Structure formats: structure tokens, C-alpha cells
Amino acid sequence: MMYAGSEPADREPDSSARPPLVRELLLVVGLFVIYKLGRQVANGHVDEAYRNAGHVWDFERSVHLPGEGAVQSLLLHNETLIHLANTYYATVHFPATLLFLVWLYWRRPRHYIWSRRILAALTGAALVLHLLFPLAPPRLLAVTGLVDTGQVYGPSVYGATPATDSMANQFAAMPSLHFGWAVMVAVGLIVATRSRWRWLWLLHPLVTLLVIVGTANHYWLDSIVVSALLAVAFAALRLPRTAPVRAHLPWPSTTGEPVPSAVPYATDPVPSAVPYATDPALPAAYASTGARR
């Protein structure tokens, strides 16, 4: 018995479960455009975003979460490490998620549909939260004392003036989709594969978490909130199971006697083509019968 979540890594993909490519491309592009437009709509709430940032910072200190500065101080010891962290933040997020979806589409179609639904639900919920709770990242909050590593060391994906940045909404820190998507990529690959090394995919969200906190683009609370949203999505959208493969069994006999198998067992005697070839008494009986004729 084998389900979609436990199929071996070398099993051929079920092409019947693969949705049409053109439809999927249009759907993914449409979702991305809606997300980008939604983030732009959420732009402009500068004062509210800074107020919320102060509340988040105070809340984290009141519940004794570790300071984001502890992670950043480790990166600041080496300029090369800072460059790597900024580059990871700027270049890995979208390409890694896109490659993840493309691989699942061709190799694990059922897992692809499930993962796409999870990502769409998570992104939609995050967009709503961006609209309801604009939040300035810690790099923009003076009380944190953190360095905007992207602007100081580069590379940066954001404009130098957050309030007028037309490329991205810098006041949409909560929840962190960088971390949420990274967790989904890791979980999706762990579920869809059977390699003994598949658990190493957890390094992706772990490195992402250290990067988004160390570069002061997100608070710890941003990753906690997105993890909660992802848990709800996992509970609501379960991976569908394939029908179990059952062996064909013959119908039971109405007389209660066992039904003979269609294929003889290896231990069953094979009847001879000549009846008396193996019984020495038969030739004599046959001869006496012929004599009486």
C-alpha cells in the first residue's frame, strides 16, 4: 500500500495529475502580479508602520526574545559574510521557490498542486496582514541600533528612501514571506522525496532566518507569525492521498471450499500427457481389457 506522501523517489511521475502547463503559468503569474499590486496598495502608511514597529520591538523585549542585534553582530565581524547574507536575501528567495515549483510540476505533480495551494494561501494571508498591520523593519527603527546592511555594504533590493520606494513596500515586514516560503520549500521537498539526505533541506529556512534577522530586514516575531499561518494552511490543505493499489483476489466459493488459484503452485504435481506413464499397474489392466475384446 503506497500513498502520495510515501512514493519512492525513483517512481515515474503520474502525468494524469499534472495540470495544464499554460494554465499553471497564467495562474502563477497572475498570483504574483496580484501580490505585487497588493503590496503597493499597502504602501504609504508610514506613521502607522513606525508605531507598529515600536510596539513589536517592545513586545519582543517584554517576552524576552533574543535581540536581533546578537545575530547581526556575528555577521558584522566579517564583511564578506555580510555581503553573502545580503546576496542571499536578494537573490535566493524568488528563484528557489520558482525552481521548487517547476521541479514538483514535472516530477511530483500531486505534490505540486498541494504545494502551490499552500503557497497561494500563505501569500494571500500575508497580503491581508500587510494591509492591516503595516510594519517598518528593524533596520528602519532607530531604537534598535541595528545597521541597514543592504544600504551600507550592499547589495540591496530596496530604495534608499523607503517612503517613496516604488519597487517594493518596505513597510510589509510582518509576516516574513522570505522565511515562510523557505519553510514550504523545505517541507515540500522532504515530503516529496525519499533520499536519506532530504532533511538537509531544512538548512534553507534556517539560513534564511539568520539572514533576514542578521540583515535587520525582519524581527523574530515576523518568522513566528508566518510559521503560525503556515501551520494553519497545512492543517486546512492536506496532501491528497492516492488510491491504494490492491491485489486482485478471487471471489470466495459459495460452498465454503477454497477457490483454486488460476496459477498452479510450484509444488502441485504436473499431470503426465500419457496416463500410464507413471503408474506400472495401468498397462497390465489395459492389456487384460484389450484381451477380452
Image (cartoon, rainbow, N blue to C red):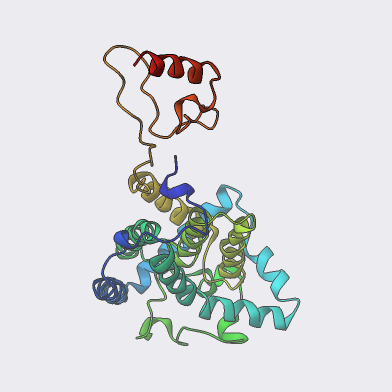
User: Which residue: 30% across, 18% down?
Assistant: 253
Task: Say left or right for 21 vs 65.
Answer: left
Q: Which residue is nearer to you in this view: 279 or 202? A: 279
In which image quadrant can residue 17 be found? Answer: bottom left
Q: Which residue is nearer to you in this view: 57 or 210? A: 210
Q: Which residue is nearer to you in this view: 118 or 7? A: 7
In which image quadrant can residue 37 be found? Answer: bottom left
Q: Position of residue 146 (x, y in %)?
A: 61, 72
Looking at the picture, does residue 277 appear above or below residue 114?
A: above
Q: Position of residue 53 (x, y in %)?
A: 46, 64
Q: Position of residue 132 (x, y in %)?
A: 30, 61
Looking at the picture, does residue 165 appear above or below residue 281?
A: below
Task: Say left or right for 73 vs 156.
Answer: right
Looking at the picture, does residue 175 appear above or below residue 191?
A: below
- Work out whether residue 252 can be spotted: yes
For the N terminus, the image quarter is top left
Residue furthest toward the right?
Answer: 77
For the C terminus, the image quarter is top left
User: Which residue: 47% across, 53% down?
Assistant: 227
- The mark total stands at 0
Task: Say left or right for 254 vs 190.
Answer: left
- Work out whether residue 148 can be spotted: no
Q: Position of residue 174 (x, y in %)?
A: 42, 62
Q: Which residue is nearer to you in this view: 191 or 4? A: 4
Looking at the picture, does residue 112 appear above or below residue 1?
A: below
